[in-house]
Image (cartoon, rainbow, N blue to C red):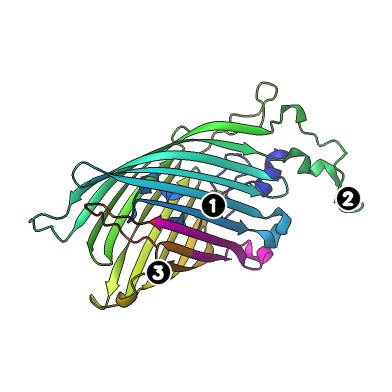
Amino acid sequence: MKLFCKLALVGSIGLGTVLLSVQEANAQDPRYSQYYQAPLRLNPAMAGVFDGIWRVGANFRSQWGSVNGASNAYYTYALGAEYKLPAFKGDYVGLGFSALTDVSGGGQYNVTDVNIGATYMKKLTGGGRSYRRTLTSYLVAGAQLGFGQRSVNWVNLTYSTQYQVADNSYDPNSFSGENTGAMRGTRFYPDISAGLLWYGVMGERKSIYAGVGLFHLNRPEISLFNRTVSSAALERLYSRFTVHAGGEFLVGGRGSAISLLPGAVGMFQGPTMEFNMGMGIKYQAPRYDDFAFRLSIWTRLANRLETDIDADAIMVVLGIDYQTFQFAVSYDVNTSTLSRASNGQGALEFSVIYTHSGDYARGQVCPAFN
């Protein structure tokens, strides 16, 4: 139990809030505040849902340096790549690859995963002479298969039994009371995820979407203890369920440069939950359609160790779209009870996406994600 309490402080556990119960060591997933800049982390069905042939992206997040110090902050890096090709009449197939690594705290608790996935995009409405010709809609189903890895640098951890009252320090050479012979350096495990997405495009800069994602369907074992030589309980990664919805709505008629990007994201994993909602403003002058500026403000609510709901953070996102590139930077202002220790300093994120547009004989229209 002493070790679990220590890991609760250094573990990689749901970026944004400390969500790991000291009574259960089932860690939560790392994730980003720029949800749609890392689409495959939000919903496996989003692979291939973009205007173009292929795209690649990268994300970086740093958090809790104000609490733990820069050397013990949480750092998360991710890469993603997608490819899309036409199939049958008006349908598409998407292929996706994603990789993430997260390192947190003085114990350098590490979570790494690599996934490959595929989607099928079925065209439901659009074109022809029907009364629905102004609405083009798709239903997308996707699945991911991959593996994950977790590890911790045990020698960096200290325990309550090593605390020296006399000089307020820890003696790493004194006996910790833990079963060090049962400690494993690394755990590998398989991982299975799936998702659904529906979206409709009603015209220029007018769209709506809704989706669900199911991660860790197989609930892999993630224990860093060898249970054959210890009494440690079986520990499995909680499945994660995500729901998200939003759209783009042009303001002021066809010649307007302003559109609104509302959105909501809910995440549920074991005893923990997050609910995020926000609104973005997009400026894209019709005369210069290769440039757009985006400003979004989101708020995040989360529960604290199976108790009350806490206003965890306010996220401000600035984005620039230039030709086939998307750049974004965001900052989380910590508003939870931890703000007394963090002074309101939360997380800093950067992201970049490149899309190779290309031209198909028949084009697929896609929504704009906030």
Front position in the image: 143 or 79:
79
Front position in the image: 2 or 224:
224
Q: Amino acid at mark 3?
A: Gly
- Per the picture, the main secondary structure of the magenta-coloured stretch is strand
Residue 215: percent from left, percent from top: 44, 41
At label 1, counting other C-alpha atoms closer than 10 Å, the crowd grade (few under 14, some 14-19, many 20 or more) is: few
Q: Is residue 115 magenta?
A: no
The circle drawn on residue 280 is 3
* Residue 232 vertical placement versus 269 (above, below): above
- The answer to whether residue 157 is seen in the rendering is no
Instruction: Report how far apart the C-alphas of labels 2 and 3 lie in the structure.
Output: 52 Å
**Left or right for 188, reference 41:** right
Which quadrant, please, contains the C terminus?
A: bottom left
Q: Amino acid at mark 2?
A: Val
Q: Amino acid at mark 1?
A: Thr
Q: Which residue is mark 1?
A: 307
**Left or right for 235, reference 141:** right
Front position in the image: 347 or 18:
347
- What segment carries the magenta color? 328-355
Residue at figure coordinates x 19%, y 48% from the top left: 124
Instruction: Report how far apart the C-alphas of labels 1 and 3 lie in the structure.
Output: 31 Å
- The answer to whether residue 94 is seen in the rendering is yes
Q: Which residue is mark 2?
A: 165
Q: Report the number of discs.
A: 3
Which quadrant, please, contains the N terminus?
A: top right
**Left or right for 145, reference 245:** right
